[in-house]
């Protein structure tokens, strides 16, 4: 342990920098790094290499190879570059590789070398060619900035939502800038460029010259510039070997350093930690690496090989042909604990725990010391925090062990921080494994969040690990396991060598009915890969039939979509499919489809009834549904047609349809109606008045009321009105006319088919008791009582009822006995009843 | 006399929450269109809207003028127009004509369409076809449950009946499922579900799907209502077709109760203007007589009048202080009661005038004969006379349907002659009405049925019972038969009465039809609740032609539901229910210690059913 701080290098009085190995790389590089375009994604992301065609003049016939490795040097993809010459490579925030070509086209590849899409940076770029390009990251996503052959800049702040911005011209710019970078301030991307001794800032509208404060005189050009990970700081390297470090706004100088090396550095990047006061820049030359900051001395490393710097949130990754290292400022907690002769509580606790393991009493002494100062809580916290910043699991363990040891002597130390740190470290150690190759530090991990880390694992197709992490961290299924399974399934459907059945089965076995998995999404992906059959199979597993429909429609499986929509019970969905079908199929097929789906058919019919009457007719025609067709024309004869001729014609069509439907009754009725209509028309012409659209009964009544008895008789005969009806009709009509004479004549014309009780009734309705009495005498014996009651002659009714000895009649009369007037009658009936019962 | 509830009867859940919910949502929607606006309301929505938000609430939210959606062109000068409509195509065309007229005139206004209870894709499509889809904004007011009374929820969708049972249009089923879902989120899950009928089954399944898609949050809730029973109207047309003789039903048949209130005309109010009266449990007089057989009502009212008089009379012997007390405290209540009493007496008189005549007695007699199945010839003649005399087109139609259903269809001769007579009396357009009735199974011809029955009985002797059931199903799908007679026998719907049925002290649910008939729908509910399943009722279910559409869903853990909630039963009538059925179930509840709650697509009666089936000349 004595030598634990051996790799710590002090910079000034207050900070230490350490460099440790992440991986020893065993990638089999065919080219030297210096001959390649290199792009490494931040947050321990992948590395892309493409032999730079401009560096070495080789015959153009040899196509370069684009290779993608994990941070640990595991090959992820390798493909022959067949497109045009590439100027620059870069990774987007979604870990997509952007390859900027000389002609301004940007090709986008996935992590596994799968081509995703491409876009162009505009005509101006195409004409003037790309001189240089940078991929940069802002809070909105990843942007591309391009310097064209005409020394103009074009940029897009977000490649996901491509909006090209052409930056203003730098006045009098004749040659390419010596160096340039993108800045991001107030959520807007700017470009800072150096031309000779001058610096220019290009923003939205204008180009302005800027001067960094405190720059010593004698600078004739800037060789390199670097902006920090968070766009807060800027470093400039001048041709005098002077390094200016300040804020990115160029308003304030933080520190400066003169390294006296005039050779242009290969790379310069910031190396700072969030929330740290220390500012340091790492500068790399061919064989030398220098860390400079606010101190007179710098830290120097010798580089044995070609190396490449990758700026990170809290340090710098340095990789070469054989190793991959991380250089960072030692975090406060680690420094406190491990600094030589540190008396910080954490350091003492670590010591105490070691002594305790040795079963030495010193443990107690150390512990007592901490407790006396009341710093045990702080000590535990320090150990936990420091554990997070350690790369080596053994160091993590010993720190955590110390923390756990210290916790024993504390009441109510909240366990969350310890538990979470243990969990996080487990996750980190798992992803840092060289098979996985994501060397995240604790700070990066926290910045990235577990969700994004899981996404990245999914992107690397490391589904089992991702699921294990979800289960280990007990993430809710919808966010965790099922999301990953869904991704896995989406990947699975792309495996073209496996049969549809196998893929579908495999997916269903794994996914089952995990909540939150959308089979329709997976199916959509399968369809996207051109596997329609598989998509249909997968859709079968989708429990919500409503979800299946849109995709089925897209796949032109409209009929299947229709039955699924019907299954879902959502009529709107059915309707959507119907309209789709209507446009897709010819009319005949469309109707045939409907025919097999009664629910859809009735839905469509309802719609047609209101909106497309003609279609409705066609629909019935197609089905040979003559019954409905007849009804349709009948309805038309009332609603659509105005003229009599039109109406009769419609009725004729209806009657024909009814005959075809073998509905003779309806056909006859319709024909009668045609006759009646014509007749009514004639009556209107000849007699005046309103006849049209009256019912037969009303027509005859109207005729009688108008005194056209002959006509009425004729009509009744023509339309075979039954006697009973005719009698009722005449009776009512004549009574209405109060033509009592005619009524009497009528009553005597022959024996009434409806009896004479109705005569009594109708006369009473017209309050003509005199006439009523006439007929009462003619009422048959079985209705006599009723007739008398109608006349209001309760006493006589009672007599008749008693005579009949009819129980029902007796109670009927009794129910009509009201109050005092009929008291005697009621008694009489009661007596008769009593007598009847005796017998 | 008035039915008191048993002391252990469970408390009813608070339905006023539904009103508040609907109001808040409407206000939210109105606020989406800030500033003054004119509101166009569909006629059918006016009464329900009135129960939710009155004019002053609308005015508070900057509704300037109110218009009715009708065919006349509207003369609104507002810059913003808001339409509150049912999702119907004709409304869309109305709106389109309005918007297009504005366009022609070069006028620019804001339009918003609020669909209640939901919008349909077809409506949006019509807007699109009319070229105004981009000019209007669409919203949904998910107002599907209107509490008409403490125990009665109505969806106020009378068109449900025709749309589903005649046109086979299943659009509203989703609305029903949504409404059930809302109820279960508000009042906890329903541990026991029963249902019968195709529509009931579909609604139930869709509702279940909705519940599954929802997060399991509600699952931990204690159920407030222990049972839910879904029932299709076409399981029991008979009950709905009978003349109602319970007071509330009779008021509905005579005056038409609309959205829980009734317009009493001058003949009732005994002054020269009509009066709109809200009929619910808050009307103290009404709540005591609503479930009574009409023959008791008059006696009750006169007793009540005497009591009231006595209370008024008390003031005679009062000193000043007592009088002051009387005036300040009791008088108002008495006056109120007085007013209501005189209204109901007026209504009774008016009903008596219409119903106690010879005709009505004959009518009831005929109905009872039909239900019991005797003197069919006589009844048929009665119906024929009824038609010949043009008594009332709706009544005649109702009797024909009743005859058809109780007799498993009319014999061909009668079928033809009655139809001919009917068309001669009421117009030939009813050819379409008959085609509708036939499709809905309300008025059918017997011909093939009898032959089938013969074959069926022969076949069923040869095979096992189970197979026989299947064969019968197969036959019945050929000719949907009501089997009313057989069901009636099985379920004992016609009570055997020795002597007079005492309507003052009802013995069973038959009292709602003067003791002649127990409503089939209510009897089914009673039987299922008794058994807690359909077990033992297989034969009835088969006779009802819905073997595959009867279901029971019992909760695995019944313990979560309190015994109180298990005595609350929500009955859902798909296609409407009548006040007689409500009264009958209220009676059953009192007998057994249950409380029934009712959810219906609309309150209906025989006239409404017949009108829904009639084709009226436009």
Image (tube, coloured by chain):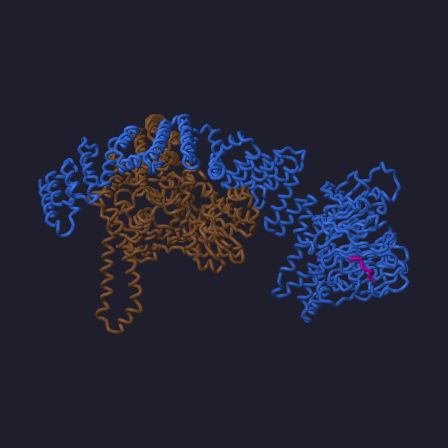
Q: Residue furthest bottom?
A: B320
The quarter of the picture where residue B382 lies is: top left
Residue B252 lies within the magenta run: no
User: Is A579 above or below relative to A12?
Assistant: above
What secondary structure is the magenta-colored segment mainly?
strand
Residue B552: percent from the left, percent from the top? 41, 42
Looking at the image, residue A459 sits to the left or right of residue B450; the answer is right
Looking at the image, residue A74 sits to the left or right of residue B281; the answer is right
Looking at the image, residue A490 sits to the left or right of residue B251; the answer is right
Q: Quadrant of the C terminus of chain A?
A: top left
Residue A114: percent from the left, percent from the top? 72, 40
Residue B46 visible to an observer of this rendering:
yes
Residue A11: percent from the left, percent from the top? 82, 63
From the viewer's side, name the closer residue of B354 and A599: B354
From the viewer's side, name the closer residue of B603 and A168: A168
Residue A546: percent from the left, percent from the top? 54, 41
The quarter of the picture where residue B375 lies is: top left
Start-end of magenta stretch: A206-210
Residue B374 visible to an observer of this rendering:
no
Residue A208 lies within the magenta run: yes
Looking at the image, residue A288 sits to the left or right of residue B563; the answer is right
Instruction: Output the letter for the chain in brown.
Output: B
Q: Quadrant of the N terminus of chain A?
A: bottom right
User: Is A527 above or below relative to B298?
Assistant: above
Instruction: Output the letter for the chain in blue.
Output: A
């Amino acid at each position: 342990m004595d030598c634990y701080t051996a790799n710590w290098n002090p910079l000034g009085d207050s900070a230490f920098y350490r460099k440790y190995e992440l991986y020893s790389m065993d990638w089999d590089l065919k080219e030297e790094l210096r001959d390649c375009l290199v792009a490494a994604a931040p947050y321990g992301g992948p590395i892309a290499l493409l032999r730079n065609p401009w560096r070495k003049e080789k015959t153009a016939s040899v196509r370069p190879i684009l290779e993608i490795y994990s941070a640990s040097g595991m090959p992820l993809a390798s493909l022959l570059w067949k497109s045009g010459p590439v100027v620059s490579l870069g990774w987007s925030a979604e870990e997509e590789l952007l390859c900027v070509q000389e002609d301004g086209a940007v090709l986008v590849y996935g992590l596994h070398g799968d081509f995703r899409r491409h876009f162009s940076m505009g005509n101006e770029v195409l004409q003037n060619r790309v001189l240089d390009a940078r991929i940069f990251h802002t809070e909105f996503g990843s942007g591309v900035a391009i310097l064209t052959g005409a020394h103009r800049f074009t940029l897009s702040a977000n490649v996901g939502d491509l909006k090209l911005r052409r930056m203003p011209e730098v006045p009098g710019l004749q040659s390419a800038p010596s160096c340039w970078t993108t800045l991001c301030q107030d959520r807007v991307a700017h470009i800072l460029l150096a031309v000779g001794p001058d610096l220019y800032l290009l923003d939205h509208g204008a180009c302005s010259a800027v001067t960094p404060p405190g720059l010593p005189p004698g600078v004739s050009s800037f060789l390199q510039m670097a902006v920090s990970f968070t766009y807060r700081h800027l470093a400039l390297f001048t041709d005098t070997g002077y390094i200016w470090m300040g804020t990115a706004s160029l308003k304030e100088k933080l520190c400066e350093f003169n390294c006296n090396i005039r050779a242009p550095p290969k790379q310069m990047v910031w190396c700072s930690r969030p929330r740290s006061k220390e500012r340091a820049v790492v500068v790399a030359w061919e064989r030398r690496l220098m860390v400079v900051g606010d101190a007179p001395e710098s830290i120097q490393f010798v580089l044995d090989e070609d190396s490449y710097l990758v700026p990170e949130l809290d340090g710098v990754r340095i990789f070469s042909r054989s190793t991959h290292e991380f250089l960072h400022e030692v975090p406060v907690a680690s420094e406190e604990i491990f600094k030589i002769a540190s008396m910080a509580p954490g350091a003492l606790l670590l010591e105490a725990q070691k002594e305790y393991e040795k079963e030495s009493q010193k443990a107690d002494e150390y512990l007592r010391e901490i407790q006396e100062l009341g710093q045990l809580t702080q000590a535990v916290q320090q150990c936990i925090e420091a554990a997070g910043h350690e790369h080596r699991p053994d160091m993590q363990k010993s720190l955590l062990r110390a923390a756990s040891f210290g916790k024993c002597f504390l009441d109510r130390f909240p366990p969350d921080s310890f538990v979470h740190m243990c969990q996080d470290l487990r996750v980190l150690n798992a992803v840092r494994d060289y098979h996985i190759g994501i060397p995240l530090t604790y700070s990066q991990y926290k910045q990235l969040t577990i969700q994004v880390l899981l996404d990245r694992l999914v992107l690397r197709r490391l589904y089992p690990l991702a699921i294990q992490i979800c289960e280990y961290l007990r993430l809710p299924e919808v966010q965790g396991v099922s999301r990953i399974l869904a991704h896995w399934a989406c990947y699975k459907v792309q495996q073209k060598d496996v049969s549809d059945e196998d893929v579908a089965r495999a997916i269903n076995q794994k996914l089952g009915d995990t909540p939150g998995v959308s089979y329709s999404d997976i199916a959509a992906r399968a369809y996207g890969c051109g596997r329609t059959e598989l998509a249909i199979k997968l859709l079968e597993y989708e429990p919500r039939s409503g979800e299946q429909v849109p995709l089925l429609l897209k796949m032109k499986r409209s009929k299947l979509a229709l039955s699924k929509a019907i299954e879902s019970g959502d009529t709107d969905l059915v309707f959507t499919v119907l309209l789709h079908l209507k446009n897709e199929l010819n009319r005949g097929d469309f109707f045939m489809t409907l025919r097999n789906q009664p629910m859809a058919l009735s839905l469509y019919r309802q719609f047609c009834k209101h909106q497309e009457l003609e279609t409705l007719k066609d629909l019935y025609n197609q089905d040979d549904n003559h019954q409905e067709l007849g009804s349709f024309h009948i309805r038309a004869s009332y609603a659509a047609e105005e003229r009599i001729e039109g109406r009769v014609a419609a009725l004729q069509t209806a009657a024909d349809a009814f005959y075809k439907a073998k509905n003779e009754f309806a056909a006859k009725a319709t024909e009668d109606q045609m006759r009646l209509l014509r007749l009514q028309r004639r009556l209107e012409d000849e007699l005046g008045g309103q006849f049209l659209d009256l019912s037969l009964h009303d027509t005859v009544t109207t005729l009688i009321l108008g005194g056209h008895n002959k006509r009425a008789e004729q009509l009744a005969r023509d339309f075979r009105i039954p006697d009973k009806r005719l009698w009722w009709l005449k009776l009512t009509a004549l009574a209405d006319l109060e033509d009592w004479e005619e009524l009497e004549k009528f009553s005597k014309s022959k024996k009434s088919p409806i009896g004479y009780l109705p005569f009594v009734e109708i006369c009473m309705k017209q309050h003509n008791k005199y006439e009523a009495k006439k007929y009462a005498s003619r009422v048959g014996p079985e209705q006599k009582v009723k007739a008398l009651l109608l006349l209001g002659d309760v006493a006589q009714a009672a007599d008749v009822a008693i005579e009949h000895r009819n129980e029902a009649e007796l109670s009927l009369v009794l129910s009509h006995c009201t109050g005092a007037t009929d008291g005697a009658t009621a008694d009489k009936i009661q007596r008769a009843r009593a007598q009847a019962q005796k017998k | 006399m008035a039915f008191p509830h048993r002391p252990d009867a469970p408390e009813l859940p608070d339905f006023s929450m539904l009103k508040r919910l609907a109001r808040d949502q409407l206000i939210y929607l109105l606020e989406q269109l800030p500033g003054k606006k004119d509101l166009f309301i569909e006629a059918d929505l006016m009464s329900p809207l009135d129960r939710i938000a009155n004019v002053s609430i609308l005015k508070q939210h900057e509704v300037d003028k109110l218009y009715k959606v009708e065919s006349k062109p509207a003369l609104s000068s507002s810059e913003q127009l808001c339409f509150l409509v049912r999702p119907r195509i004709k409304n869309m065309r109305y709106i389109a004509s309005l918007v297009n007229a504005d366009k022609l005139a070069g006028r620019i206004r804001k339009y918003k369409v609020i669909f209640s209870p939901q919008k349909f894709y077809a409506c949006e499509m019509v807007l699109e076809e009319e070229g105004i889809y981009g000019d209007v904004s669409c919203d949904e007011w998910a107002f599907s449950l209107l509490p008409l009374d403490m125990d009665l929820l109505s969806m106020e969708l009378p068109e449900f009946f025709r749309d589903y049972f005649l046109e086979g249009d299943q659009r509203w089923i989703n609305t029903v499922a949504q409404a059930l879902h809302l109820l279960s989120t508000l009042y906890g899950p329903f541990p026991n579900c029963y249902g019968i009928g195709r529509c009931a089954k579909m609604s139930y399944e869709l509702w279940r799907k909705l519940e599954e898609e929802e997060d399991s949050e509600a699952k931990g809730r204690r159920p407030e209502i222990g049972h839910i029973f879904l029932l299709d109207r076409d399981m029991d047309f008979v009950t709905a077709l009978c003349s109602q003789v319970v007071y509330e039903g009779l008021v509905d048949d005579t005056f038409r109760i609309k959205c829980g209130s009734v317009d009493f005309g001058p003949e009732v109010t005994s002054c020269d203007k009509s009066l709109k009266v809200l009929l619910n449990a808050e009307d103290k007089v009404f709540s005591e007589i609503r479930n009574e057989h009409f023959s008791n009502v008059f006696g009750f009212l006169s007793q009540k009048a005497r009591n009231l008089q006595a209370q008024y009379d008390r003031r005679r012997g009062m000193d000043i202080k007592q009088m002051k007390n009387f005036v300040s405290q009791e008088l108002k209540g008495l006056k109120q009661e007085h007013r209501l009493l005189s209204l109901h007496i007026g209504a009774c008189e008016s009903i008596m005038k219409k119903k106690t005549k010879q005709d009505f007695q004959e009518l009831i007699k005929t109905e009872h004969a039909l239900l019991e199945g005797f003197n069919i010839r006589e009844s048929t003649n009665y119906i024929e006379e009824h038609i010949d005399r043009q008594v009332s087109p709706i009544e005649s139609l109702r009797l024909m349907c009743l005859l058809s259903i109780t007799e498993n269809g009319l014999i061909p001769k009668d079928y033809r002659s009655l139809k001919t007579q009917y068309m001669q009396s009421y117009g030939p357009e009813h050819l379409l009405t008959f085609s509708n009735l036939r499709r809905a199974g309300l008025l059918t011809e017997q011909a093939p049925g009898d032959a089938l029955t013969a074959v069926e009985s022969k076949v069923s002797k040869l095979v096992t019972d189970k197979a026989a059931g299947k064969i019968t199903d197969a036959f019945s799908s050929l000719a949907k038969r009501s089997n009313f007679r057989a069901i009636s026998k099985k379920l004992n719907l016609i009570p055997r009465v020795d002597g007079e049925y005492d309507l003052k002290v009802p013995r069973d649910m038959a009292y709602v039809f003067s003791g002649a008939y127990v409503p089939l729908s209510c009897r089914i509910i009673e039987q299922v609740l008794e058994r807690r399943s359909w077990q033992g009722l297989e034969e009835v279910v088969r006779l009802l032609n819905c073997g595959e559409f009867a279901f029971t869903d019992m909760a695995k853990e019944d313990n979560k539901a309190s015994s109180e909630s298990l005595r609350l039963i929500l009955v859902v009538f798909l296609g409407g229910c009548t006040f007689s059925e409500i009264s009958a179930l209220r009676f059953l509840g009192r007998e057994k210690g249950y409380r029934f709650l009712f959810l219906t697509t609309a309150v209906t009666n025989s006239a409404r059913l017949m009108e829904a089936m009639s084709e009226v000349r436009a």
